[in-house]
Amino acid sequence: MSTVIQSRKACTVNPLKMSQPIGGALAFMGIADCMPMLHGSQGCTAFGLVLFQRHFNEGIPMQTTAMSEVATVMGGLDNIGSAILNIQQRTKPAIIGICSTGVTETKGDDVDGYLKNFRATHPELDRLALVYVSTPDFKDAFQDGWAKAVESMVKGLAEPSSARREGSVNFLVGSHLTAADIEELREISESFGLEATILPDISGSMDGHIPDDFTPNTLGGTPVEAIRRMGEAELTIALGEQMRPGAEALMAKTGQPYVLFDRITGIEATDQLLDCLSQLSGQPVPGKYRRQRSQVIDAMLDSHFFFGGKKIAIGAEPDLLWNIGSWFSEMGAIITAAVTTTHSPLLEQMPCEEVLIGDLEDLEARSAGCDLLITHSHGRQAAARLNIAFLRMGLPIFDQLGAAHRLSLGYRGARDLTFEIGNLLMAQEEENRPDSWPLPTEDHDAHAPFAFG
Amino acid sequence: MLQNKIQDVFNEPGCSKNQSKSDKERKKGCTKALQPGGAAGGCAFDGAKIALQPITDVAHLVHGPIACEGNSWDNRGSKSSGSQLYRTGFTTDINELDVVYGGEKHLFKSIKEVIDKYDPPAVFVYQTCVPAMIGDDIEAVCKAASQKFAKPIIPVNAPGFVGAKNLGNKLAGEALLDYVIGTEEPEYSTPYDINIIGEYNLSGELWQVKPLLDHLGIRVTCCISGDAKYHDVAQSHRARANMMVCSKSMINIARKMEERYQIPFFEGSFYGISDTTESLREITRLLIQQGAPAELHDRTEALIAQEEARAWQRIAEYTHRLRGKRVLLFTGGVKSWSVVSALQEGGMEVVGTSVKKSTKEDKEKIKEIMGQDAHMIDDLTPREMYKMFQEARADVLLSGGRSQFAALKNKMPWVDINQERHHAYNGYEGMVNLVKQIDLALYNPMWPLLRKPAPWDMREAQT
Ligand code: SF4
C-alpha cells in the first residue's frame, strides 16, 4: 500500500514522461498496413520519428497534418482532409490512425464531426479505415495515449457479432510489452491451439525484420480485418490495467467477456495466464511450460540471495512500474523509490511507501544509496552521478541495442530477468575487509578496559 | 514582433540563395508551404534548440507541453569539455489549467526554481507552439525575471509552427545577437582571436581542429555554439575574425557581427582535406589583415604542408581498397561538395549527391568537382533510394540516420554522417577517420554471409 503524491514543482527537470500523441502513434504502428499521423505541426511528428527510430532501429512510418501558424489560428480541419488524400495517393494504406496534439487541441477542432463529413463527400475512400483519437500533449502521458488509441480502434472498427469462433481469443496489450513479449504471448497461446488476435501487435512491425520490398506504411501488425472480427472471439484477455477501457469498450460493443491480468512477469502472473488459456482451450498446459516453470523456480532459488533486502529505485509508466515493482518485491527486494508519469488505480497498491508522479530529478534525489536504478535511457546521467547499477527499461532506450527484443513475459521472461538482474546485483556485492565490522566508537571508548602506557 | 524578426531573417543579405530571388519570392521566405500528409522535417523550435543547446553551462528551459522537450531531450551529440548542465532537460510541462489561464506565472516560477537549484550563468527560455497560441509573452517574462534575479534570462522566440529547422537556427542567432553577444567585455584580447560560428561540436569534432589552431597560437575565443560557455558568447564581439561554418544556418550572426563590431568573416568548412587547408589559410589571412604579425602566414603553410602529407599518407593506405567504390551521398545538400571532394580524394566515385538544400554556388561547385554530368539529385523518395540499393547501383550510402534503412535493409553498407553520429569527421583527422569508417563498413566480412540465402531456400530455388 502506498501514498500517491504529485510533484509540486513548477519546473520539470529531466522528464520521465513522454507525450500522449506519440503513445497513440506507437499503438497505431502495431496495426498492419497503417500510416499513423499526428494532427499538429510537423515538428511534433519529427521528434516522435527520431525517438522511435532510435529505440527500434527501424524506419518509422508517421505523418503529420503539417499545421502552420496560420492554420492553427484558422482551424486545421482542412489539413486533415488534404493529408488523408495525400497519404492515400502516395502510400495507399489500409488505415490511417490520427492523433491530435497540443497545437490542435488548444483551439479544439471538432475532428470527429469533420471526419463524418469527409466520409460522406469521399465515398471512393470507403475501404480506407480512419481512426481518430484525442490526445492533447498538455494532459496525461504516453501510456494514456496508447490506451486511448486502442480504445478508439475497438470503438471504431470492431463489429458487433453474435457468432463465436471456437478457439479464438483476443489479447489487448499495454504499452509496457515489448515486441519479444508479444511474440512470446503468441507462441504461448498457439501452443494451446488457440488462434489469437493481438491488438496492437508491434511484434510484427517493430521487431527488426528484413522486408522484401520497400513499404512506406507499417509492415506486419494486427490486420484491420482481424480487429473488425474481434467480437467473434470467445474471450478477451487484457494485459495491463491501461487496457481496461479498451476491454470495456469491446465488451459494450460485442457483449464479449474479458479478463484482465495486470502483470506479465513472475511465476504467479504466468500461472494465471496459462491456467486461463488451458481452461479456455480445454487443453492441458504443454510440457515445455511445465519445464520452464521449474526453471523459474530454480532460477529464483539460485538468485534470491542477491535480491533479499536490496534497495531498488524505479522510474516508469504505471503499468510497467506495477509489473516490475511487484516482481521485485516478490523476490525480496525493497522498492525505496518509485516515480511515475500519470495516474493509475494501481499506484496505491504498489508495494512501497510512496509513489510520486514526477520526473527523473525526483527519482535521482530518492535514489541515493540504492543498489539498482531502473528507468529508460534518460536515467543514464543520474546513474552515472550516483554511481549505482543501472538497468534500462521502458521507452526510449536509445543507447543500447535490441530494446524490442527484451523479454519479461512468461516463465522464460521471468527466468532471464532473474538472472540478468541477479548478476547486476551480485556484481554490486561488497567484498568483506578487515575494517568491515568496526565497533561503535562512542560507548566503547568510554570504558576501555585496558590502557597501556 | 516575431513576424518582423522572421521577415528580417528572410531578408538576409548574406544569404546568396536569398539574393538570387526576386523581391516577391523573398517575401515568401525560404520555408516552402508544407504539404499535409507529406512532410517530415523538424520544427523551428527544434532548429533553435540544435543551435543553442551546445552552450554547455546554461540552463535550457522549454516552455510548453511535455511533447517538445519530453520527447527529445539529451538526444543530440554535442560534446562538452566542462559543464554538463546543457544535458539537463528543463521544461514547464504545461497542463490544461495553463492552457486556459495562461502559462506566464508558471514560466516565471520555473525560472526561479532553476536558478535556486542550479544557479547557471544564464537561462535560455524557448517558446513553443501552445504557449505562443495562448499568447504567453516570454519576452516580457524573461525581462521581468532578468531584473528580479539579476541574471540574463534569454528569450528564444521560435515556436515550432513558424517554420522549419533552418528558420529556427536563424531565430536562435537573432536571440544571441539581441541578448548575449557584446553584453560583456573580455579581460584581454589578442590579435589571434577568432570565433567559429555554426559549429556544434557533434561527437567532439571541434577537437579535431582545435589542436591545429592551438599549434598556430590562434585562440578560439568562442565557438557558437559547440562547447561554448555563456561568458564566451557574451564576449565574442572582441574577436578579430569570424569563421562561418555549415552552410547558411547562422549567417545572420556572422553578418551582423561584421556590421556591428567590424569583425570580418569568411565561409568555410572543415569537411575534407582541401577545405580544411583553405579554411586555415582564410583564418590566417583575415587575422593578418586585422593586424596579426605576417609571420603567421609561413607558420600556417608549414603546418598545412606537414598535416596534409600526414593525412594523405594515412588515406593512401585505403585508396587501393576504396578505388572505384560507388558512393551515394545523401546529406540534404549542405556543403555536399566539400564531402564529394574528400571522397574523391579517397579514390571513390560519387554516383549521386543530394542537392535539396544546396545553394546555386554549391551546385556550381559540385559540377566543378564532379564534371558536367554530376549526378545531382533534387529529392530522392525513400522508395527510389531503396530501389537503388536493391539493384546495387551503389556500394555504400553516406547519409543521416533517417535514410539508413534504404541501404541496411538491402544488406548494403551505410555510414552515418549526420547529427547523431558516433564518429567525428572534421579536419585532417576527420577525413582519415571517414575513409576508415567507409572501409570498415564496406569490408565487414558479414556482408556475404547475410546475402547468402538459407540452404533450404537455395535448394527450393533449384528445384
Ligand atoms: S511543432 Fe510546436 S508543439 Fe510540436 S514539437 Fe515543435 S514546438 Fe513543440
Image: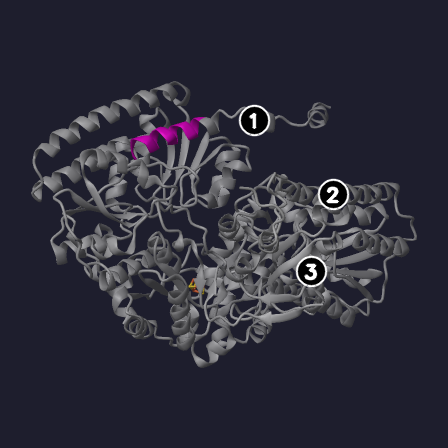
Q: Which residue bears the numbered disc 1?
A: B446
Quadrant for the N terminus of chain A, please.
bottom right
Query: Please, what secondary structure does the residue beneath circle 3 have?
Result: helix
Q: Secondary structure at mark 1?
A: helix
**Disc 2 and disc 1: Cα gap in Å?**
37 Å
Subunit of mark 1?
B
Which quadrant of the frame does ligand 1 lie within? Answer: bottom left
Q: Which residues are magenta?
A: B427-439
Q: Mark 2 vs mark 3: which is more N-terminal?
A: 2
Q: Is residue B41 visible?
A: yes
Count neighbours of disc 1 (C-alpha within 10 A) and say few if under 14, some if 14 to 19, many if 20 or more: few
Q: CA distance from mark 1 to mark 3?
A: 42 Å
Tell me where residue B426 appears, x and y as whole percent: 32, 37
Find disc 2 in the rendering and name its residue: A303
For the residue marked with disc 1, what is the amino acid?
Answer: Met
Residue B354 point in image, percent of width and height: 37, 42
Q: Quadrant of residue B213?
A: top left
Q: Nearer the viewer, mark 2 or mark 1?
A: 2
Question: A405 or B329: nearer the eye?
Answer: A405
Calculate the distance from the C-alpha at mark 2 to the C-alpha at mark 3.
Answer: 22 Å
Q: Which mark is residue A322?
A: 3
Q: Is residue A118 above or below residue A312?
A: below
